[in-house]
Image (cartoon, rainbow, N blue to C red):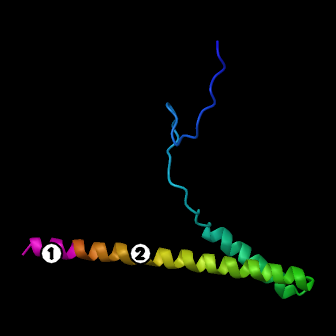
Amino acid sequence: MPPAKPTTDRTTTEGSNKSVTPTRKRQPDLDKSLAELEAIVETLEEGDLPLEKALQQFEKGIKLSRDCQAALTAAEQKVQILMQEDLQDFEAAGDEND
């Protein structure tokens, strides 16, 4: 029997229960990021780190802060969209009852 040919890169496999989704940058867990940011702030406030390590922690804190802000902004936009949709549904239901 001839050796099996190597398989090519496939996005799905027969009989597989795995769903295939496009690769996207995963959103960071907001609670985890906030906790990590708080820990960095506490460490920096202690003032015991050498300058180079303090700068590294500061940079990491800035990145976490920006990630958290982006997550909060996205959540706020979703809430506004949902509220607008609910208001439109409510107004449409009111028009039907007239």
Q: Quadrant of the N terminus?
A: top right
Displayed quadrant of residue 46: bottom right
* Image disc number at residue 79: 2
Asked whether 55 or 96 is in front, the reply is 55
For the view shown, which residue lies furthest in the left direction? 98
Q: Secondary structure at mark 1?
A: helix
**Mostly what secondary structure, the magenta segment?**
helix
* Position of residue 98 in the picture relative to residue 32 (left or right): left
- For the point 63% across and 30% down, the residue is 6
Of tags 1 and 2, the one toward the viewer is: 2
User: Which residue is label 1 attached to?
Assistant: 94
Q: What percent of the width, then of the height, locates residue 33?
A: 67, 72
Displayed quadrant of residue 26: bottom right
Q: What percent of the width, then of the height, locates residue 72?
A: 53, 77
First to last magenta residue range: 90-98
Instruction: Kindly identify the amino acid type of the residue bearing the numbered disc 2.
Output: Val
Question: Which mark is first along the chain, 2 or 1?
Answer: 2
Q: Quadrant of the C terminus?
A: bottom left
Asked whether 96 or 47 is in front, the reply is 47
Q: CA distance from mark 1 to mark 2?
A: 22 Å
- For the point 77% across and 76% down, the residue is 39
Callout 2 environment at 10 Å: few (<14), some (14 to 19), or many (20+)?
Answer: few
Instruction: Kindly identify the amino acid type of the residue bearing the numbered disc 1.
Output: Gly
For the view shown, which residue lies furthest in the top direction? 1
- For the point 16% across and 71% down, the residue is 93
Q: Secondary structure at mark 2?
A: helix
